[in-house]
């Protein structure tokens, strides 16, 4: 039996839609790593819902209007595609905002369902599940894939607009996770005011990022693990339960900002592994921030 489902992931900077056909019988029968989800469409719009939230603690009227406008377009598309079930999640900006209820109420008016506002830890778990489900499993029949990209454990880094999640785990199991407030929108609005940013602004952003990375390092015991960055995993994983969906990293549109790397397992020092892995995070955040200035 096939159901057509829609998932919407609303973050601090963008809002994403996935509509797919879900093979409900196959999703319970196949092993982890084999897709039971066939994409119909993937959409992404920059709405910057979290504009000003770091400073004011509230979702701005203009940001709410932009996001609801994009959501109306998604709702129209969902109707045209005859979707059977819809699920939406909201992340960093919504959970930080004092007036989040205004947003969730407006979403329900447009979409018919209220968004689930997930915690940072839930977001980390969802990102990990969406990004790694197919990595450890066999290649899908007829897909042309050579097989698993890397053996577990995995360290996934998900750089968003409001927060960045670090998740260590194996296929289907999270070992440790930490969400820290160093998203590209938050860092841009908090520190990077010039164009180009002044050296002091960059230094302040770097110090903020370094402090957050220390918190992440305290929460994750990394040891020679493959590391990847994924944006969109939450859309897939949270939408319809992790036992029913999968996420293919290569399907990300080329014009979206996402960053990934793989750590060689031969690296010897834990501290060296961390410093080498995390050194790319400030550069990635800086690159993402330039899109928003």
Image (cartoon, helix red, strand yellow):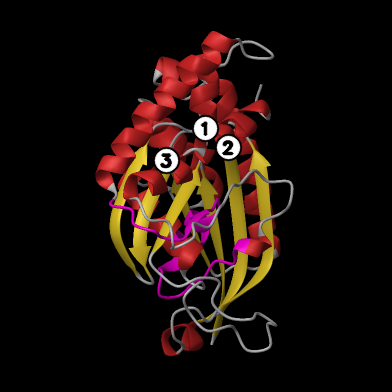
Q: CA distance from mark 1 to mark 2?
A: 5 Å
Q: CA distance from mark 3 to mark 1?
A: 12 Å
For the residues bearing labels 3 and 1, Cβ distance under 8 angstroms: no
Residue 275 in picture, x, y percent from top left? 42, 40
Q: Which mark is residue 284?
A: 2
74 to the left or right of 86: right
Instruction: Please give the name of the residue rendered at 50% of the width and 42% of the height, measured from the top-left corner.
Output: 159
Q: Earlier in the sequence, mark 2 or mark 3?
A: 3
Q: Earlier in the sequence, mark 3 or mark 1?
A: 3
Q: Which residue is mark 3?
A: 275
Instruction: Give the residues in magenta.
Output: 221-249
Instruction: Please give the name of the residue rendered at 42% of the width and 85% of the height, measured from the top-left corner.
Output: 28
SS at badge 2 = helix
Residue 216 is at least partly visible in this image: yes
SS at badge 1 = helix
152 to the left or right of 177: right
Residue 149 in picture, x, y percent from top left? 55, 71
For the residues bearing labels 1 and 2, Cβ distance under 8 angstroms: yes
Residue 119 is at least partly visible in this image: no
Residue 150 in picture, x, y percent from top left? 50, 70
Instruction: Please give the name of the residue rendered at 54% of the width and 53% of the height, measured from the top-left corner.
Output: 230
Q: Which mark is residue 53?
A: none
Q: Which residue is mark 1?
A: 282
Q: Report the residue that reaches farthest toward the right.
A: 255
SS at badge 3 = helix
In the rendered view, tell whether residue 140 sits above or below residue 39. below
Give the number of the mark in front: 3 or 1.
3
Instruction: Please give the name of the residue rendered at 37% of the width and 55% of the height, measured from the top-left corner.
Output: 268
Report if residue 226 lies within the magenta region.
yes
Report if residue 172 lies within the magenta region.
no
């Amino acid at each position: 039996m096939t159901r057509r489902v829609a998932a919407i992931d609303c973050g601090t900077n963008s809002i994403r839609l996935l509509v797919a056909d879900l093979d409900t019988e196959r999703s319970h029968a196949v092993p982890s790593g084999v897709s039971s989800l066939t994409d119909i469409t993937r959409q992404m719009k920059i709405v910057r819902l979290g504009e000003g939230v770091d400073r004011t603690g509230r979702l701005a009227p203009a940001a709410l209007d932009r996001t609801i406008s994009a959501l109306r377009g998604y709702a129209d598309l969902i109707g045209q595609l005859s979707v059977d079930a819809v699920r939406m999640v909201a992340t960093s900006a919504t959970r930080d905002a004092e007036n989040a209820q205004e947003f969730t109420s407006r979403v329900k008016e447009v979409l018919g369902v209220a968004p689930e506002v997930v915690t940072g830890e839930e977001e980390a778990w969802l990102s990990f599940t969406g990004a790694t489900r197919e990595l450890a499993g066999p290649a899908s029949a007829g897909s042309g894939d050579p097989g698993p990209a890397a053996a577990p454990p995995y360290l996934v880094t998900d750089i968003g607009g409001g927060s960045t999640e670090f998740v260590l785990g194996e296929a289907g199991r999270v070992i440790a996770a930490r969400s820290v407030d160093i998203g590209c929108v938050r860092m841009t609005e908090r520190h990077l005011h010039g164009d180009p940013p002044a050296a002091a602004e960059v230094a302040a952003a770097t110090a903020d990022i370094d402090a957050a990375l220390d918190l992440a390092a305290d929460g994750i015991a990394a040891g020679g693990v493959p590391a990847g960055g994924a944006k969109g995993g939450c859309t897939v994983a949270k939408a319809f339960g992790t036992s029913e969906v999968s996420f293919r990293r290569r399907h990300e549109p080329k014009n979206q900002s996402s960053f990934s790397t793989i750590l060689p397992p031969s690296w010897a020092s834990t501290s060296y592994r961390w410093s080498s892995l995390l050194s790319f995070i400030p550069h990635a955040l800086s690159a993402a921030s330039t899109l928003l200035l």
